[in-house]
Amino acid sequence: MSIDYSQVHRELLSRLGPKAVTDDPVRRFAWSTDGSYFRIVPQLVVTANSLKEVEETLAVARQHNAPVTFRAAGTSLSGQAVGEGILLRLGYDGFRKIDISEDHHHVTLGAAVIGADANAKLKPFDKKIGPDPATLASCMVGGIVANNASGMCCGTTENSYKTIASAKLLFADGTYLDTGDEASKKAFAEKRSELLKSLTELAEETRNNEVLTNRINHKFAIKNTTGYSLNALVDFSDPFDIINHLIVGSEGTFAFVEEVTYHTVVEAKFKASAMAVFYNMVDAASAIPPLKMDAVSAGELLDWASIKSVTGKPGMPDWLADLPEGSAILLIECRANDQETLETYTQQTIDAIKHIETERPIEFSTDPAVYGKYWAMRSGLFPIIGGERPKGTSVIIEDVAFRVEDLASAAADLTDLFHKHGYPEGVIYGHALDGNFHFIITPHFKRQQDIDQFDRFMQDVAKLVIDKYDGSMKAEHGTGRAVAPFVEMEWGVQAYEMMKKLKAAFDPQGILNPGVVLNEDKEIHVKAIKQAAVVDDWVDRCIECGFCEKTCPTSELNMSPRQRITTLREIARLEQEGEQQAAAKLKADSQYDVIDTCAACQLCTISCPVDNNMGMLVRQLRTDLIDSTAQKVLDFQAKNFGAVNGVLSTGFNMLHGIHKLTGSTVTGKIMDLGRKVSKEVPYWDPSFPKGSNLPSPQPGNGADKPQVVYFPACGGRTFGATPEDPDDTTLPDVMVTLLERAGYNVLVPGNTRQLCCGQMWESKGDYKNADFKRNEMVQALKEMTDNGRIPVIIDALSCTKRTMQDSDIDFKMLDAVDFIHDELMDRLPPSHKKGSVALHVGCSATHMGAGAKMEAIVNRYAEEIVRPEGIICCGFAGEKGLYKPEINASALRHLKERLPAEISEGYYANRMCEMGLTRQSGISYRHLAYLVEECTR
């Protein structure tokens, strides 16, 4: 029976509203990919921030028999977070509960809590959650549980299966269960008695089947996430315990996970690492069995291909180039809660493998600066291979597991398969202590023969892993679609039939993530494969992992860099395949989401493992949108910027006068009329500042006084005080007062109004005028430095950043933050300190590494710093916040609620950002110079 998705859409809209549900083709396509190599475009996308929204979605889905795929962070690598029908994604505001028990032995986490955020809350108590996937800084708890995700240290003893205490679950039929609450369990038993009866019978049937029980125990003796967690049927008899553990690794096919309570594990205080270099893979693998002891926390194996791929790369040890061909490296880490135990552990480790010859002595280091380089080699593999792959190729990471005694021969066999099937670039590395290998290949998927080639490779991998070694096709990445065709092959008929019975018991209607984990289509792993069309050097390395989504200020508003890039790739694919009309339509329809609302803050580069830069690409794309009329306007502004800047400052003063006389309604209507004439007219907001002024330093006096050139950036000399600021003092006046108080003669360029770093032109894609203005400014400032003797200070971090990047500056130029920290703090001790103040460390501060100095300044002049959690970019994006206020509103939607009530002022170092922070917080945000000036009077 076909599904009428237009009717489904109407019903969801009536229940959830337009913000939570969309059938927009652009956004549906944008959410059609996860961290895997699949692309499946859903018919509808629901963004859920409450359990009620999930309940309503499932109710509509049941009525229409529409499939529902649950998606957390979408970092999954096996295609389990994409699907047809309804894609229900966790929003950025709900399911964020973090509740630590009084004894710190348990932590309750909402499904949308990012793993690393949970650990950050647990760190003061020397605790953490057990699961430690490599994506911990981005993945969400819902996905960690659903995939039974693990990593380098948790192995099979501290993963979700072993550390889950209870869970809050919503089932397909709408019933709800808290496995940690007796009342909830009693109510569930009345409503779903048939499920509990089925699970009890299936568990008893399994335990009575000696062959099946032995098979299950054998399969879970090593890492295994292929299929369902059948060990729950052997390990537990109580049906609620069985549910609790079957949910782990079920990939959204049994229920929606609202919350999970974990048993926490100890985070060791002392660590030491060593790099054991062996002459060959056989020797390295033979070292693994002796290291399976309490003394060793992690053991990561790198084959020769892995070593070659990182050799000579930044941050890698120089001596890698001198290793003999065929070498293998084993990274070993020991952890303990005291130094004495750590020393015992490291010696035990060395003694355990001293019978095996190594290329160099095994020496443990407790210095993070030293062993950090060791682990940089391991973590650098993926981004290096992903970043250097040929354009248009995909990156596929598979993970398999073997008995540790089979590792050496299995590695050799896998390498042979790489060469047999045309993937000579393939590398092998992984969690050796658990017998877990990851391998990376970078195939093309342009032609059917490319897909057929990959299919033949995967068939041979399955024969190798399953038939020859009886290993796991998936060790920690989840089954998904990538391995669903091989589940029965790996487990056998009896176990596979048991899995099908479990699916039918939990989800009789079959609407939860169908086709994932169990799939009768034996070719599903080579269907719906996404294309990696060539777009631009800035983003062609993108592997669509989703790491950028945590830092992007527009993720909640509409798209993150991942969605923007996947959309651009589709436009490029359509163009390259001659579908020009479809490409033009997608380009036009997606302009708002992809180009217009990107803040271009470049925070995505911080979390991106392959150094993509969506911000720079968007600015480049904006170049194509500049028509001849717009270019003339930009040229006029650049040529006559002094007059333009002066008019803007005067205009905001006039605007405040109009507002004072007429009120917000009339002022807003006037601005709306202006916007009909020009999109350069901003939207009215009562928090708009007054105009500012140029600095007026005292005439130079005293030849013995040091001199400084002060350049007031556009923001501070254009925009003055907001209604929330305690007084009308402008930033240029404060800076001059501060510098003169510190004993400096202050010099200011005579043509200050005309000068600009060019940021406002670059943000629009006008690089010609942007670079012209920067060069003009640099030259004007240089002429005032007396051949470099006099330093130059700029009072806006973003302006300093752009002026200094890609510029051949041969004189001393500093941001005001640096100058205050390095020079003024010693000259100007506080006469008094403020109490608690807020500090914002925005995108420019992050890029420039200014956060530590900013904190030091505030600590010097205030008693306490408050940095609201999760606020990393204001979303004002230069002057874009004036024309696209929704970006700022979305990026700072939690700012006000996360500021303690007693906080009445905040500080940063960029006037435009401060305006956005003030607007959304309701308190005054100003430059750090204000804090220093007020506290040194």
Image (tube, rainbow, N blue to C red):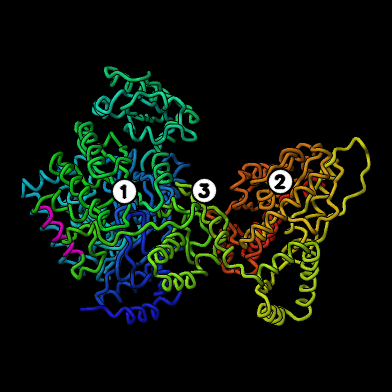
Q: Which residue is drawn at 73% across and 62% down?
A: 638
Please provide percent x and percent y for residue 525: 24, 56
Q: What element carries label 2?
A: strand
In this rendering, the label closer to the viewer, 3 or 1: 3
Q: In this view, does 128 lie above or below 714?
A: above
Sequence-first disc among 3 and 2: 3
Camera-nearest residue between 931 and 291: 291
Q: Quadrant of residue 705?
A: top right
The amino acid beneath tag 2 is Asp
In this rendering, the label closer to the viewer, 2 or 1: 2
Q: Is 222 within the magenta?
A: no
Q: Does the image show residue 509? A: yes
Picture disc at residue 815: 2
Q: Which residue is drawn at 85% across and 47% down?
A: 747
Q: State the residue position of label 3.
A: 606
Q: Residue at x 39, y 70 (%)?
A: 579
Q: State the residue position of label 1.
A: 149
- Identify the magenta region: 494-506
Distance in Å between CA atoms under marks 2 and 1: 44 Å
